């Protein structure tokens, strides 16, 4: 992995306008051999995450040979079940890739001062290259203060204002948030033509929507970006123009087939748990996109689960290894 990489310059085929004619595959040019072989139109997030993790594992081995074992420490406050699952997979993936992965668990009653003291200790620990405080935090803790306390060069979440600023001005030694970085990696790995494409993002969060917009308009990515949100007038008029539609609104199946341009590439960042009496658990995970109908219109689409989610963790590992390389 190259230092400060936001784009995928090696095998990816970004920008082949001469091969972008025709519908419905107008914005697809899947020239990465292994991915181009499957023509389901469904992006395989698990396969792609595994490929990225294999690259990360090689980087880990190189760093270890130099006496540096990349280390990520996650701080989990409280007993939110979903957060516990995410944190468990982060720690497990670290260990699978030969990295050090530690989770510090504290009860929801922890004070802000106590949490900041943990961050200070991790900031000073040379064996810790990446620090992630799992969000959301209990209401009595100021999340912004915690995020700002993490050293920017260990902030592998990319949430610190220094990293937000670096992403915004295109300084590549910072960290981009993992979910949007994973989405861009996905688009590039599948050879989606981004240059000149109309990219419409639904959602303006600091974690996904805003950094996604920054990434898509970077030189070298070169999309024309529109960011829509809950106050946007006539949302469908915007989404119907999109060559690349990225949805991170947190509303189950809000994007329907009539809102999507034929041949568009649709990325669903949504993770919504809805009631489903046919499941043993009584619930089911769905995205923000009505998958069954939109897949008939889109040229390429991510499923939920099995799409973006796995890429987020793989990108976190990639950021941590880069932090270790930059710090040592
Ligand atoms: N909670 C849900 N997603 C994330 C993430 O990417 N980072 C952190 N720190 N907390 C989260």
Image: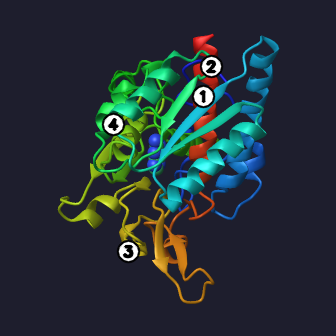
Q: Mark 4 points at which residue?
A: 112
Q: In which quarter of the image is residue 238?
A: bottom left
Mark 2 vs mark 3, CA separation in Å: 46 Å
Q: Mark 2 points at which residue?
A: 324
In primary-sequence order, the first of circles 2 and 3 is 3
In primary-sequence order, the first of circles 1 and 4 is 4
Depth check, mark 3 against mark 4: the one in front is 4
- Decide if residue 195 is in sight here: yes
Mark 3 vs mark 4, CA separation in Å: 47 Å
Would you place residue 206 above or below residue 259 in this image? above
Residue 67 location, x and y as percent? 77, 12
Residue 328 location, x and y as percent? 63, 10
In primary-sequence order, the first of circles 3 and 1 is 3
Determine crowd level at label 4: few under 14, some 14-19, many 20+ residues with C-alpha closer than 10 A.
some
Determine crowd level at label 3: few under 14, some 14-19, many 20+ residues with C-alpha closer than 10 A.
few
Q: What element carries label 4?
A: helix
Determine crowd level at label 1: few under 14, some 14-19, many 20+ residues with C-alpha closer than 10 A.
many
In primary-sequence order, the first of circles 2 and 4 is 4
Residue at left 36%, top 51%? Answer: 201
Q: Name the residue under label 3.
A: 258
């Amino acid at each position: 992995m190259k230092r400060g990489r936001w784009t995928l310059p090696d095998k990816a085929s970004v920008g082949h306008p001469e091969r972008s004619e025709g519908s419905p595959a107008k914005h697809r040019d899947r020239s990465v051999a292994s991915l181009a072989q499957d023509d389901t139109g469904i992006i395989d997030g698990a396969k792609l995450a595994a490929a990225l993790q294999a690259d990360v594992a090689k980087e880990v081995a190189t760093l270890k040979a130099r006496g540096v074992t990349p280390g990520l420490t996650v701080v989990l406050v409280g007993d939110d079940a979903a957060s516990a699952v995410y944190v468990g997979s982060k720690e497990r993936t670290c260990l699978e890739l030969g990295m050090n992965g530690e989770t510090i668990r504290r009860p929801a009653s922890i004070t802000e001062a106590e949490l900041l003291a943990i961050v200070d200790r991790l900031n000073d620990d040379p064996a810790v290259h990446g620090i992630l405080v799992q969000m959301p935090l209990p209401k009595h803790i100021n999340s912004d203060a915690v995020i700002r306390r993490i050293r920017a060069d260990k902030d592998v979440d990319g949430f610190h204002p220094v990293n937000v600023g670096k992403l915004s001005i295109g300084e590549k030694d910072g960290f981009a948030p993992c979910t949007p970085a994973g989405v861009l990696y996905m688009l590039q790995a599948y050879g989606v033509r981004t240059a000149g494409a109309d990219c419409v993002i639904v959602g303006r969060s600091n974690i996904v929507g805003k950094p996604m917009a920054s990434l898509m308009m970077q030189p070298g990515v070169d999309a024309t970006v529109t960011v829509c949100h809950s106050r946007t007038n006539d949302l469908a008029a915007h989404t119907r123009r999109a060559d690349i539609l990225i949805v991170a609104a947190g509303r189950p199946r809000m994007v329907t087939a009539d809102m999507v341009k034929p041949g568009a590439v649709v990325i669903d960042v949504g993770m919504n748990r809805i009631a489903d009496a046919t499941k043993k658990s009584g619930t089911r995970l769905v995205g923000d996109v009505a998958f069954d109908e939109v897949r008939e219109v889109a040229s390429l689409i991510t499923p939920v689960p099995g799409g973006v989610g796995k890429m987020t963790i793989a990108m976190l590992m990639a950021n941590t290894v880069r932090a270790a390389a930059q710090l040592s």
